[in-house]
Image (tube, rainbow, N blue to C red):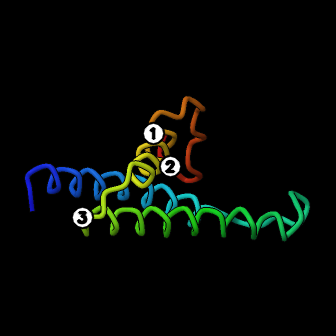
């Protein structure tokens, strides 16, 4: 493997870690409240995060196998960028020390 391919693989792994960890955190924090929204919307939101994590892993695998494609790298960069540079304020976790 060339040095560029190794660098792209490391970049893809780093980006998929950002995506995967965020997806896990969101899914772990989800709780359905009957008065909040319909269950199908809650389920669809959760499934969307699972699909995002799986798609990120798949894109990283494709890049790691040497089948570099700008759309795979673009997907990883854009998804991780949206997660890392989100300007919305995070609400403090329940039970966290002040």
In percent of width and height, residue 22 lies at 48, 55
Residue 91 lies, in percent from the top left, at 60, 40
CA–CA distance in space, label 1 to label 2: 27 Å
Q: Are marks 1 and 2 in contact (CB under 8 Å)?
A: no
Badge 2 crowding class, 10 Å Cα cut-off, few under 14, some 14 to 19, many 20 or more, is few
Identify the residue under disc 1: 81
Element carrying mark 1: helix
Which residue sits at x=59%, y=52%?
Answer: 94
Name above or below for residue 45 compared with residue 11: below
Quarter occupied by residue 45: bottom right
Kindly identify the residue that appears in the image at 60 percent across and 32 percent down: 88
Q: Which residue is mark 3?
A: 66
In primary-sequence order, the first of circles 1 and 3 is 3
At a point 17% along the width and 55% down the height, the residue shown is: 5
Residue assigned mark 2:
96
Viewer-side label of 1, 2: 1
For numbered disc 2, what is the local secondary structure?
Answer: loop
């Amino acid at each position: 493997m060339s040095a560029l391919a190794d660098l792209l693989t490391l970049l893809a792994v780093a980006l998929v870690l950002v995506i995967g960890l965020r997806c896990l955190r969101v899914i772990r924090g989800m709780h359905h409240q009957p008065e909040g929204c319909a269950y199908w919307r809650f389920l669809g939101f959760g499934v969307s995060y699972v699909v995002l994590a799986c798609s990120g892993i798949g894109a990283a695998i494709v890049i790691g196998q040497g089948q570099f494609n700008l759309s795979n790298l673009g997907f990883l960069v854009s998804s991780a960028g949206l997660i890392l540079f989100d300007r919305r304020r995070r609400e403090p976790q329940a039970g966290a020390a002040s």
